[in-house]
Amino acid sequence: MNSDLGEGFGIWRLGDDPALLDVVTSANVACGFHAGDPATMHRVCVAAAERGVAVGAQVGYRDLAGFGRRRIDYDLDELRDDVLFQIGALEGFCRVAGARVRYVKPHGALYNTAAVDEGQASAVVAAVRAYDAGLPVLCQPGSVLAGLAAAAGLRVVAEGFADRAYQPDGRLVPRSVPGAVLHDPAVVVDRAVRMAVSGTVVALDGTEVAVPVESLCVHGDTPGAVTLARRVRDGLAAAGVPVSTPGAGAW
Amino acid sequence: MNSDLGEGFGIWRLGDDPALLDVVTSANVACGFHAGDPATMHRVCVAAAERGVAVGAQVGYRDLAGFGRRRIDYDLDELRDDVLFQIGALEGFCRVAGARVRYVKPHGALYNTAAVDEGQASAVVAAVRAYDAGLPVLCQPGSVLAGLAAAAGLRVVAEGFADRAYQPDGRLVPRSVPGAVLHDPAVVVDRAVRMAVSGTVVALDGTEVAVPVESLCVHGDTPGAVTLARRVRDGLAAAGVPVSTPGAGAW
Amino acid sequence: MNSDLGEGFGIWRLGDDPALLDVVTSANVACGFHAGDPATMHRVCVAAAERGVAVGAQVGYRDLAGFGRRRIDYDLDELRDDVLFQIGALEGFCRVAGARVRYVKPHGALYNTAAVDEGQASAVVAAVRAYDAGLPVLCQPGSVLAGLAAAAGLRVVAEGFADRAYQPDGRLVPRSVPGAVLHDPAVVVDRAVRMAVSGTVVALDGTEVAVPVESLCVHGDTPGAVTLARRVRDGLAAAGVPVSTPGAGAW
Amino acid sequence: MNSDLGEGFGIWRLGDDPALLDVVTSANVACGFHAGDPATMHRVCVAAAERGVAVGAQVGYRDLAGFGRRRIDYDLDELRDDVLFQIGALEGFCRVAGARVRYVKPHGALYNTAAVDEGQASAVVAAVRAYDAGLPVLCQPGSVLAGLAAAAGLRVVAEGFADRAYQPDGRLVPRSVPGAVLHDPAVVVDRAVRMAVSGTVVALDGTEVAVPVESLCVHGDTPGAVTLARRVRDGLAAAGVPVSTPGAGAW
C-alpha cells in the first residue's frame, strides 16, 4: 500500500501524514517541485523510517502553483534533470533518517503524461537509470512508462487504484468522467481485495480486466482518507493478503 | 583555488563556467536556491568530474530574486533543512557524474551571516554533521562558523580572498566601503602568492594580518574574471606553490 | 473590522474566506508574494465587492516558503518596487470586480519590521505615495511606519488587536512571550469593545494604555476564527459602536 | 516597431534595454511570470515613458525556469487570472511613470499556443476584455487569437517578424527548421521595408504572402540585436515609412 505524503508547502498542509504513515507501507514523498518543502521532507522521512515505511521519490513538474497537475511540454533533458534533482534532494533526508530512497513514482500530470508519452517516459527512465539502475519505478501496468522502464532493465512495480474506475483496456477513467472516482468505502475495500487476490478489477462497462498490481495506491488528501486506508488494510488482512514493506532485497 | 560556478538560472547565465573549470581546483556549485537549475547543476558536475575538479555545495538562502544576498531571519531548523536539501540535490548530480560532494560552502548573505551569527552558523553545522560528518566546511578563518564547525568535529578549510581588502582583525572590509574590492591584477596576484606562501595579508591600515588559508576564492562573475584567475594560478606556480585538487583522503 | 484573506496558494487553502467576508468590513487581500495566487485574488475581490467589503493590499516579502514571516534585509528600492508590484496586481482584480484598492497594509515580518525600521517603513511609504498619495496605510499607532506615513502626507488608519496582549508603551507583546495571544472569546470581545469605545486597552502589567484605533484586526487562520469575529462584531453592535465599511470619501 | 524588454530577473540580465528603447516605439515589458522583476519593470516603464515609447504587457506562463517557452496545459480560468495579474502589476509601474499599459502581447509558448488553441486564446481575450475592452492585442494576423479577439470586439494589432521565415499560409516557420531565423542584416531590413510598404513577405517556398502588419517585432536578446533594430528603423525611414508611437487615440 502506497500513499502520497509530504504534500504541503511552507505554512500550508495537505492530508494527515502521521496517520497515513501508520497505515501504508510505502510513502511517496513530494520533493519540492509540485509540493513539499525541505522541513516537511525531513519530518516525513524521519517519521517513515521510525515506522519502517519505505520512502519513494514522488517526482513532479516544477509547478507549485499548479500542484504539478498541468502538463508541461518540457525539454526532455531538462525533465530528466528535474527528476534527478528531486531524487537527490530526497535522498539527503533519507540518509539523515538512516534510510534511502527505495523507488520513484511520478506525480500528477507527469504520471499521466509518462503513461502515454514516449518522450517524457524516457526522460523519467533516463533519470532513474543514471541515478541508480536498481531503483524500481512505481507506475501503472501497461503504461508507456512501464514498458520503457522494463526495456531499460529497471524493475517496474505495478500499482492499482481501488477507488478509481477502470476502462476495459486497463487504463483509468479520467477524473472528468462521472463515476471516475469511487466513494463508497465498502466498494473500495472489495475492489482492493479483488485486485490483490485475483489481480482483476471490474471495468466501467462490467467486463473483468486484469490488473496485475503489486502495490495499491490510497489517497491521503480527501476527508475520510485515513479511515478508508485503514479499512482497505483491514480488508486485505481479513482476506489473508500480506501487506508488507518492500524488503531490503526487494523494491 | 575555488570559484563560484553554475550560478545561472534557466535562460540566464552568469560567468564562464567552462573556462573557470580549466583554472580552479574546486567548484562551488550553486544548488538551486539562490541560483542554479537542475540542468546547469548536471552540466557543471559532469564538466568538473571530467577535469578532476572537486565539487562543493554552494548552499544559499531560498531567494532567487535576491541572489541569496539579502539576509533572511530563518527559523533555524528550516535553515538546516534548506541546507540539507541543497547538499542532497547536488549529490545526485555528482553521483551521476561519478563524483561526490566534497565540501560545503555557504553563499552570499548566508556566508556573511554564518560568519557572525551563532544561530545560523549552528544550522549550517547541524546540516553538514547530519549529512556527513566527514564533509569539510569552506569558510573564513576566525569566523563564528569556523569556530562552531571545528567544535563540532568538522574539518574546516580556511579560505582567503586575494581581491578583497582586509580589516586588521582578519575580517573582510565590507563591499560598501571604498577600496573593498581590488581590481589591479598585479596586486591581486601578489596578495594571492603572499597568502599562500606566508599566510599573511596587508590590511587596509597597512598592518600585516595572519590569514592561514588553504584555499583561495576567485570570483567568476566579473569581466576579466577568467584572465585574473589564470594569472593567480600562474603566479602561484611561479612561486612554487602547489595548487591541487583535494585528494580523496583530504577535504 | 479587518481581516487577512486570500492567503492560500494553488491547491492550498488557509482560513474560511467567504465566512469572514460576511463579518468584516475590510479585507486585507494577499497579493502573491507571501501568499495568494491570481485565481484566489480574483475570487476574493469579486466576493468582497459583492458584499461591499473594502479591499486592501496586504503586501508582504517575496517569500512563499516562509509565508512572509521571516525578516528579509531588502535593498530598499527593491522593497518599494515589490510593494508597488503587489498593489498594482491587486488593483487589476479590483478593477475587474468593479472596485479599487482602498488601503495598504504590510504583512507579517514586513509589518513588524516597518513598525520599527526607518528604512523599510520609508520604502513602504515611498511605494504608496508613488502609486496614489490618497491611499491610506493601515498600521499600528505609534509605529515608525505610522509616523513616516503621516509625515509624508498619507492618511494613517490605526489598528488594534483585541486578541493580543499589549505592552505598557502600546506595542504588542511578542508572540514568543507566554500570554501574548488571548484565546478566551469573552475577554477578546470585551477588549474589542473597550478599544472601540474608550480607545484604551489594559496592558500585560495592568496599566491602561491609550490605543486610538479606527480598525480592529481579527485573525482568520485559526480554529474558531469566524465565530470569534462574529462575536466581536455583535459585541460592538451591542455597545452601540457603528461598524462600517470605509466610505468613498473616507479610507 | 516593438521589442521584448525587461526580460532579466534579479541579478540576471537579458538584452540591452536602454539601447533598444532608443530605437523601438513599443516596449513589450515582461511582467514577472516568465521573466521580469519589480525593480526591472519599474526601471523600464520609467525609461519608456521618458522616451515616449508605448508600454505593452508581455504576458507569459508562470514559468521562470522555462522562460515561458514550454507549453503548459492551464486550467483556462487560471490562465485568464494569471494574465490579469500581470497586466495589473505592470499598470502599477506605468502609473508611477505617468503612463499606462497600451496593449497586451502574449509571450513565448503562450503566444504560440494562443495562435492555434481556442481555449488559451479565449482565456487571453477574456482577461483583456475584463480588464479594459479598449486595450489592443498584439499578435499574428490570421491566428486563432487574432480571430477571437476581433470577434470579441477587441482591437487587434497585427505584427510581423522581419527576421523569421514564413510559410506559404502566412505562419512562421518553426525555429527547429533550418533557415527559420534570418541573420543577414541586409535581408532583414529589406523584408522589413517590404512588409511595411506592400504588406507582403516572400515565403520559404518563394511565393509571395500577404502579411498586413502594423507593427514589426525586433528581437533584443541576440548579439547585434540593437544594431539590427537601428538598421531596420533607418531602412523604414529611407523608404518613407513613418515609424510612430501609437497615439493616445490609437493603440
Image: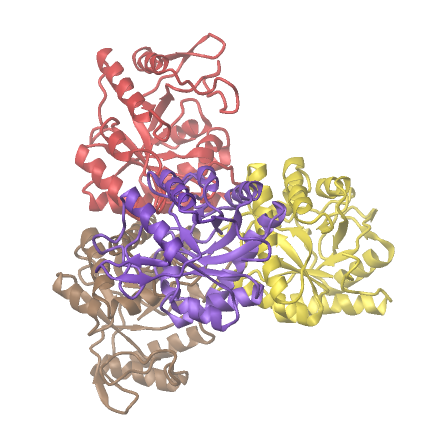
Chain colours: A red, B brown, C purple, D yellow
Q: Is residue D31 left or right of residue B179?
A: right
Residue C171 visible in the picture: no
Q: Position of residue A215 (x, y in %)?
A: 31, 23
Q: Residue at x 24, y 90 (%)?
A: B207
Q: Position of residue D248 (x, y in %)?
A: 77, 61
Q: Nearer the viewer, residue D55 or C23?
A: C23
Work out whether B72 lies above or below B226: above
Q: Quadrant of the C terminus of chain B?
A: bottom left
Which quadrant of the figure has residue A56?
top left
Q: How many marks?
A: 0
Which residue in the rendered view is the most extreme toward the bottom? Answer: B206
Q: Position of residue B214 (x, y in %)?
A: 22, 72
Q: Residue at x 20, y 32 (%)?
A: A248
Q: Is residue C197 left or right of residue D14?
A: left
Q: Quadrant of the N terminus of chain B?
A: bottom left
Q: Is residue C101 left or right of residue A2?
A: right
Work out whether D129 lies above or below B14: above
Q: Position of residue A36 (x, y in %)?
A: 35, 43
Residue B36 visible in the picture: yes
Q: Nearer the viewer, residue B228 or D126?
A: D126
Q: Nearer the viewer, residue D6 or A18?
A: A18
Q: Residue at x 77, y 39 (%)?
A: D151
Q: Nearer the viewer, residue D84 or D33?
A: D84
Which quadrant of the figure has residue B196?
bottom left
